[in-house]
Image (tube, rainbow, N blue to C red):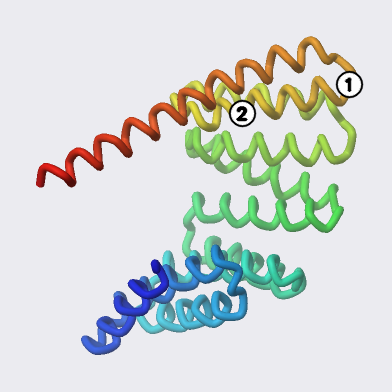
Amino acid sequence: MCCRYYDQDLALAKEQQDPTSMSRAYCNLGLAHKALGDLDQALECQKYFLATSHMTKNKGAKFVALGNLGDVYIKLNNTEEALKMFSEQLTLAKSSSDRKLEGTAFGNLGGLHRMLGQFDKALGYHTQELTIFQELNDFKGECRAHGNLGNVHMALGNYSNAYRCYEEQLDRARDLKDVAIESQAYGNLGITKMNIGKFDDAIGLFEQQLALSEQVCLSFLCICHYEKVWVQHR
């Protein structure tokens, strides 16, 4: 259903010869196809998204397109092309002197190298990711970077280091007042405790995760109910 609407959006953008709207439509259509598992269609759409972002000379859109392409290539098990896309992201971010984009690119590269089992490289990229977001006082980016570093240490069996990273992730989530990320951090801490055999501690952390997850679900249900009531009374 959503693909049909994005197709209509794309057709309208082409009819109006609006490159910016075409770029947005290709991006959305590609994401929809990826969610549905239509990876070849997703790849084609994101390539068109990249091409139209060149036309509009929109560096932010180009950065997103490269990231989307990298994600699709990972799904297609083509890590070589994914690495090219994320490396181009980093080059673009540095040429634009955009530190936030640079941090995001380091995070993408770190995640790919962790997936490939190249943990030393992954640690290096995620450390640079964290440094940038700390310098920017970007708690959301910092939170993500702490989680990424924790995941690498977990994969290496460095559970004490992983635990410290997840504690930092939890602190930043509290600063953000983001219950969903806070819940995720408690889950990460619980898994770490479980891996070192401290099951009572793990159960306590998982119970805190569950309580927060229930808050997230309740909030979502309240939003859905409000939107339903609003639509009925329009």
Furthest residue toward front? 232
Residue 48: percent from left, percent from top = 47, 82
Residue type for callout 2: Gln
| Residue closest to the eye, 184 or 171 | 184
Residue 162 falls left or right of residue 232: right
The answer to whether 197 is drawn above or below residue 2 in the figure is: above
| Residue under numbered circle 1 | 196
Circle 1 — which element? loop
Which one is closest to the eye, mark 2 or mark 1? 1
Q: Quadrant of residue 191?
A: top right
Q: Count neighbours of disc 2 (C-alpha within 10 A) and say few if under 14, some if 14 to 19, many if 20 or more.
A: many
Residue 39 lies in what quarter of the image? bottom right
Q: Which one is nearer the viewer's eye here, 94 or 214?
A: 214
Identify which residue is drawn at 29% across, 87% down. Answer: 14
Q: Which residue corresponds to mark 2?
A: 169
What residue is rendered at 67% in x and 71% in y?
73
Q: Earlier in the sequence, mark 2 or mark 1?
A: 2
Q: How busy is the neighbourhood of tag 1: few (under 14 within 10 Å), some, or many (20 plus)? A: few
Instruction: Describe residue 232's horizontal placement relative to residue 34 as left or right.
Output: left
Q: Secondary structure at mark 2?
A: helix
x, y percent for residue 56: 35, 79
